[in-house]
Amino acid sequence: MPSSSIRARAAQGTVKANAGNHVQRDPDVLDGFLEDAAHFPGGHADGLVAATCEADVANLLRGSLPVLAVGAQSSLTGGATPMGEVLLTTSRLNRIFKITNDTVHLEAGVTLTDLDAALRNAGRYYPPTPTFMGAFVGGTIATNAAGAATFKYGTTRDWVQAITVVLPTGDVLDIERGQVSADPDGHFDIQPMRGATTRVPVPTYRLPKVAKLAAGYFAAPEMDLIDLFIGSEGTLGVITEATLRVLPVRPAMCLAFVPFGARLSALAFVRQLRGLARDTWRTKDPHGIDVSAIEHMDARCLELLREDGVDVVNGVVIPAGSEIALLITLELPPEITAEQAFEQIGSCREPSAPDGPLRRFCRLLDAAGVLDDVEVAVPGDLARANQLLAVREAVPAAVNKRVGLAKKSADSRIEKTAADMIVPFDRLEELLTIYETGFGSRLLDAAIWGHISDGNLHPNVIPRSIDDVKAGKAAILEFGRQAIRLGGAPLAEHGVGRNAVKQQLLELLYGNKGVDEMRAVKAAIDPEWKLAPGVLFSRR
Ligand SMILES: Cc1cc2nc3c(=O)[nH]c(=O)nc-3n(C[C@H](O)[C@H](O)[C@H](O)COP(=O)(O)OP(=O)(O)OC[C@H]3O[C@@H](n4cnc5c(N)ncnc54)[C@H](O)[C@@H]3O)c2cc1C
């Protein structure tokens, strides 16, 4: 029977990176930590501590200085940009302790790349990774990161079994899923090492029912305490260790880059694949189509790829007149060989060919009239898979490059102006039309891509002037209202961070009252507002 109360313990380890003695203040060292991937302006830090153990983290937090924990600083929201705090890098907390059949126990500073390599050696698989594999495990938990494969596997939250968190007091909590849940009256009790019990109120707002959500604190009646810390963006505690669930077997994967001449045909194809994949999961049909991810790039994205020569470099033909392209991940039985895969593809038009998932998939492509334009990477062909993934990854890079150029040549105030919204898949066409109209009426150049299998797309302005940035922000707020109206959320996977528009979207989603309830949680756990001040919401 879970309890609503948890007892803190003292930090373990011997303080090495002593906050008093070992705060790095060398400007050359600090310089490398003043920006995250959002290129949020104005980053400055009071120092840097590279923790090597739990005690280092606790020692820093017991001091009086505000602290910002960072992982790989791949945040797209400014959440990992310091604004005068001491930076606490987890890069040296990078040990993988133990891999079992279905879990991995590790420190927060392990990168997803290193985790994936270790799991690959052990034949295991951790699926809910964001597109950027340089991210640290602690960062992905702190932001409840999600990725392309959320459609099949859910978000980071679904895979976190246990965490160790150092609280702003320096006390430590070991939280295991299923052990501590909120009292029916709506609170948790944290019993500290010294002093009175801290009562933490559970917010009363209800989360939208969407496949992924990174919108401030999780809340639900009798929720698990672990869910409060997952997605809290470093504002409630510093995650030092985690136990993650893993899959005992790594599936074989086939990637397919599929251009379509018309958006509606592509959406119909995605709808069909979503339905067939769910049937396969339910029936466990060995020949069934099992899709874990469908990525999307719109016509402007495809134009950018051509302008930058990405199609040629990666040997991908994007037919003239393509309105949209999909990058589909099809999962296949682990034992399938490349030869068998090619055989299924090659014989897909033969009516008497034996059944198989890849053959069924190719027949669907054929029925949709796109089979001849498809580029495929069969299981085991890592070189081809990397080329297809490079095409998808080149899209945000192309937009970022143009934002950077405009900032240099037109106005230094120009910044990345992008959103990360999700709606139930059946409302996606409506949202796409809203994006088109909203950008069109403001005469904005924009590209849209993302995780279409979840109804999660990233509209990005390609600004030419500061007026474009202003108009883009207004458009994003309008899109956020519409996404909420359609039963979705304006903050799907990147979180809120310090981004002013995203903080406004958080208020649109939960109202002032909801954000005040988040402030009450923060005030209970971090009364001095020491951790990540300004991230998620202001103090008021
Ligand atoms: C090219 C690219 C693609 C991306 N694709 C995706 C995607 O598909 N899906 C997605 O969800 N995100 C994506 N992101 C965003 C980013 O990768 C994720 O948010 C990631 O989870 C951040 O991890 P990080 O280690 O870089 O954390 P950071 O950026 O360093 O930190 C992010 C936040 O977490 C807090 N934090 C970090 N470590 C800890 C810790 N140990 N304890 C407590 N708080 C901590 C920080 O204070 C900050 O608020 C992408 C980013 C890039 C650059």
Image: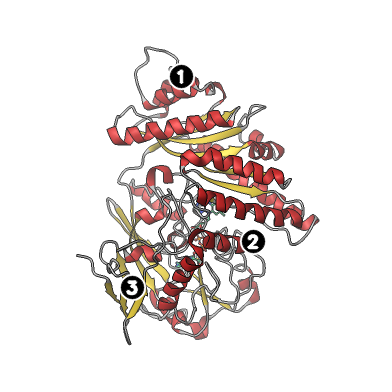
Q: Earlier in the sequence, mark 1 or mark 3?
A: 3
User: Which element carries disc 3, helix, strand or loop?
Assistant: strand
Quadrant of the snapshot with the C terminus = bottom right
Distance of label 2 from label 1 (alpha carbons): 46 Å
Residue lying at the far left in this picture: please name it: 1
Q: Is residue 231 left or right of residue 191?
A: right
Looking at the image, can residue 15 be seen? yes
Disc 1: residue Cβ within 8 A of ligand 1's nearest atom? no
Identify residue for label 3: 173
How many C-alpha atoms fall within 10 Å of the one at disc 3: few (<14), some, or many (≥20)? many
User: Which element carries disc 2, helix, strand or loop?
Assistant: loop
Q: Is residue 114 above or below residue 93?
A: above
Residue at the image position 39 percent from the left and 24 percent from the top: 340
* Rendering coords of residue 240 (x, y %): 40, 68
Q: Which of marks 3 and 2 is nearer the N terminus?
A: 2
Identify residue for label 1: 346
Amino acid on which the number 3 mark rests in the picture: Leu
Identify residue for label 2: 39
Distance of label 1 from label 3 (alpha carbons): 56 Å
